Amino acid sequence: MTNSADSTNRTNSRRAGLQRGGIELRHILSNGKEMSGHLANVVVALLVAAYIGDDVPGTRTPMTHLVLAGFAAYLLFQAGLINLPQILVTEREEGTLLRLRATPGGIPAYLIAKCLLVVALAVGSLALLLAAGALLVDGPLPHGPGDWLTLLWVTTLGLLAVVPLGAAIGAVLPNPREALALIMLPTMGLLLTSGAVFPITALPVPVQQVASVFPLKWIAQGLRSALLPDSARTAEVAGSWELPMVALVLTAWAVLGFLLAVPLLRRAARRESGSRMTARHRKAVQSGAPAA
């Protein structure tokens, strides 16, 4: 009887989460101001790629292709580890987590909705970048069915690696005013040290070793394997794409993120109260920030 009730609750949570996610996605797609923020990243990537010449050192692969593949990886990374935490901490400040106690599906439905929203925007941005890059700056595209399959599984595993982790981070960030500063510095550091914007072999070995711990390096490497010719492998640290290692590292981060996300969000929801929310708003007003 208990197992049946638990199964029903999980089904209801998934259904509620998917419905909520669909509603939020339609809202963003119809909001020009919010969409312009997501499109700005694609425009920046295309402008950077348009002004880059030369080839990747030691290969005949245009540096433009490496940069666009790196930006494609960063779009996925940013969706999970910058955009999602900001959404979660902002909505926590506004009392959304407090209201989840009386919402059908609660935390699981909320997390499903946010993941659906972020994944849809990330995949849409990635598709737009690759299509616009191919049309406007002769950017790279997969060359055959095998490359398209690699693009699909690397994108899927990459999002699984960063989206739950972003939810866990969003559950523990202090407030929206500090969240951006706390997130942006390490993520920009990873962008510069993960081989996303220039060959990772140009970096000192200790920097390469630190970058290899984090998912961005492996997402970028996996996407390069799908988008660049095999000759570009010579610019990789191991001289190969290391796709089994890409899958292993991203899977490990995905498991870690899933183990952390729901418990941390539940903990954040339990700690929420009307008095805590009022105190935060009062502090924000006193510091000169607009109240939520």
Image: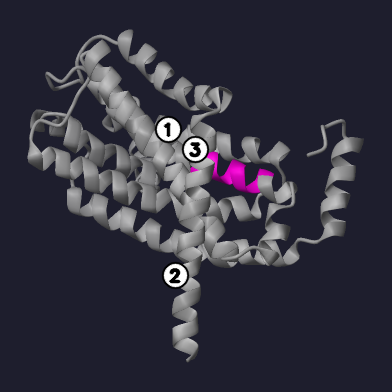
The three-letter amino acid code for the residue at tag 1 is Leu
Residue on which disc 2 sits? 11
Whole-percent x, y for residue 67 in the image: 30, 23
Q: CA distance from mark 1 to mark 2?
A: 38 Å
Q: Earlier in the sequence, mark 3 or mark 2?
A: 2
Residue on which disc 3 sits? 26
Q: Is residue 287 left or right of residue 127?
A: right
Q: Secondary structure at mark 2?
A: helix
The three-letter amino acid code for the residue at tag 2 is Thr
Above or below residue 94? Residue 49 is above
Above or below residue 264? Residue 177 is above
Q: Earlier in the sequence, mark 3 or mark 1?
A: 3
Q: Which residues are magenta?
A: 81-90
Whole-percent x, y for residue 39 in the image: 45, 23
Q: CA distance from mark 3 to mark 1?
A: 30 Å
The chief SS type of the magenta part is helix
Residue at image location 84% in from the left, 58% down from the top? 274
Q: Is residue 153 left or right of residue 9?
A: left
282, 246: nearer the viewer = 282
Tag in front: 1 or 2: 2
